[in-house]
């Protein structure tokens, strides 16, 4: 019910913009997050945004390089990734969490109710 797009192969220092769009339902009233999983590693938190879009949270490893945002209708979520590093190589997953709060963000993947299939991001050195 979530579809990610925008992944690909990029050189170190380059940029990519990931999108996460709903399929079959609206997620305008959900908090959203991005997680990633590299081969042989556990899924890890990247960034999250509140239902209203007013609150965000970032993993230390991506602060200052990645930006999460919501579209005007709050139904689509974007992840702008700049100054990419080889360590950013992973499958990136979008997730949605039901919440009554306009401002809470959720960095724990077990909290999320819906997930996309993932999009591969590969950063070459």
Image (cartoon, rainbow, N blue to C red):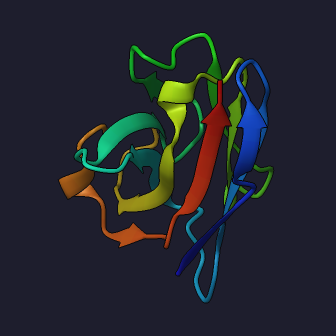
Left/right of residue 38 with respect to residue 111 in the rendered view = right
**Residue visible at 34% across and 56% down?**
99
How many marks on residues?
A: 0
Left/right of residue 40 with respect to residue 103 in the rendered view = left
Q: Can I make out residue 74 in this image?
A: yes
The spot of residue 49 in percent (x, y) is 50, 38
Up-down relation of residue 73 to residue 113 (above or below): above
Q: Which residue of the protein is positioned furthest toward the top in this rendering?
A: 64
The spot of residue 9 in percent (x, y) is 73, 46
- Residue in front for this viewpoint, 49 or 35: 35
Left/right of residue 13 with respect to residue 100 in the rendered view = right
Q: Can I make out residue 55 in this image?
A: no
**Residue visible at 44% across and 23% down?**
58
- Residue in front for this viewpoint, 120 or 99: 120
Q: Identify the image quadrant of residue 59.
A: top left
The spot of residue 86 in percent (x, y) is 56, 27
**Residue visible at 23% across and 43% down?**
108
**Split into 4 quadrants, where in the image is the C terminus?**
top right
- Residue in front for this viewpoint, 90 or 67: 90
**Residue visible at 78% across and 30% down?**
15
Left/right of residue 81 with respect to residue 37 in the rendered view = right
The spot of residue 44 in percent (x, y) is 30, 40
């Amino acid at each position: 019910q979530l579809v990610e797009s925008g992944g690909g192969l990029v050189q170190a220092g380059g940029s990519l913009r990931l999108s996460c769009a709903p399929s079959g339902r609206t997620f305008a009233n959900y908090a959203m997050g991005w997680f990633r999983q590299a081969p042989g590693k556990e899924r890890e938190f990247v960034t999250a945004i509140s239902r209203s879009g007013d609150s965000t949270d970032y993993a230390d490893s991506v602060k200052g390089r990645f930006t999460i945002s919501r579209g005007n209708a709050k139904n689509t979520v974007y992840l702008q990734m700049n100054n990419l590093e080889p360590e950013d190589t992973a499958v990136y997953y979008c997730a949605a969490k039901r919440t009554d709060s306009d401002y809470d963000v959720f960095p724990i993947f077990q909290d999320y109710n819906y997930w996309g299939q993932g999009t591969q991001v590969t950063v070459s050195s």
